[in-house]
Amino acid sequence: MRGKSQMQSIKLSVLDLVPQYNDVPPETALQEAIRLAIHSEAWGYDRYWAAEHHDLEGLACASPEILLSHIGARTQRIRLGTGALLLPHYSPMKVAESFHLLSCLNPGRIDLGIGRAPGGPAHASMALSGNFLQHVADMPTSMDALIKFFEDGYQYEGHPVKARPIPKEPPQVWMLGTNEKGGKYAAEFGTGYVFGHFMSEQDGARVLRAYREEFRPGKLRHFPETLVAVSVICAESEEKARSLTPPASSPIVNSLVGHPDKIQCELRKLQRTLGNSEFLVHCPIPDYEARLESYRLLAGQRC
């Protein structure tokens, strides 16, 4: 459980890119991801999400659903999901089958976060799925098919097709994005929306307001729900936190950096502005132990 801190009223979750820090082998990076998920559950985080990337040096997770299956066997409560699974690369039926299976193995604990990015260099994308730009253009059709599989209403040439095994509780579906276009997809298909605040220069309040106003209820979700992905570097002192900041070449637009009390205050301000129900926290500290400590402090834990 979380410590007795002001953070108790702010829901927190973990976003892990599964990095290979200091040239460690992928085996080590994956064990660190598992360790982070196990600690996150113990510290009261609501979700652990792993990202998908392809042929990017220093990142060790091309198939987050496989990693989540392993983590599910090592944990009991924490929700497990993708941040994000890159749908343009895949068949909607295959995705639905995989996440139905995960949902059967981990009842009531699976999230499917969907993204539209290639997740790697151009040639890797072409090797993986061919014409990626065409697949992105086909995204509305793919999303429609995926949602219908989860609603058990998909048909091919008039014949019902099911993505078996069918769990008692389907995965929660979320769309990830950094602008209004991603929010429009989420609203149109009745999914939750995750706004990538730490990777966006857009007005988050406007983006999320548009999603809420345009949301169409469906069988999977009756009301709009928003998560906000933030980058946090938390340490026991402001000076220590500043020393852990990654190089300026990092793709992160902004990070919340500082002592836990300062981070708490900043998150509350951001929540009042954006109206989100939960924060999905990415910690870009290039050191496994310091990263783990940052999550511990953020959760309000005591040694």
Image (cartoon, rainbow, N blue to C red):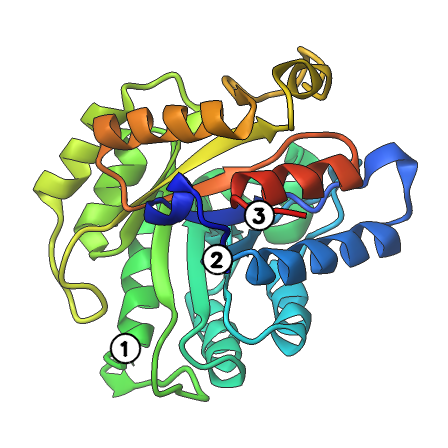
Can the viewer see residue 199? no
Residue 39 in percent (x, y) is at 65, 58
Q: Give the residue displayed 86% in from the left and 52% down from the top.
A: 28
- Where residue 168 sits, quadrant-wise, is bottom left
Q: Earlier in the sequence, mark 3 or mark 1?
A: 1
Residue 92 in percent (x, y) is at 42, 66
Q: Give the residue displayed 28% in from the left and 46% down from the top.
A: 277
Decide: few, some or many residues near mark 1? Use Cα within 10 Å; few <14, some 14-19, many ≥20. Answer: some
Q: Amino acid at mark 1?
A: Tyr
Q: Amino acid at mark 3?
A: Gln
Residue 195 in percent (x, y) is at 35, 36
As drawn, the label of residue 27 is none
The residue under label 3 is 301
Decide: few, some or many residues near mark 3? Use Cα within 10 Å; few <14, some 14-19, many ≥20. Answer: some
Mark 3 → mark 1, Cα distance in angstroms:
46 Å
- Where residue 159 sits, quadrant-wise, is bottom left
Label 1: element kind:
loop
Mark 2 → mark 1, Cα distance in angstroms:
29 Å
The residue under label 2 is 47
Q: Is residue 23 above or below residue 236?
A: below
Q: Amino acid at mark 2?
A: Arg
- Look at discs 3 and 2 and give the one toward the viewer: 3
Q: Give the residue displayed 19% in from the left and 25% down from the top.
A: 206
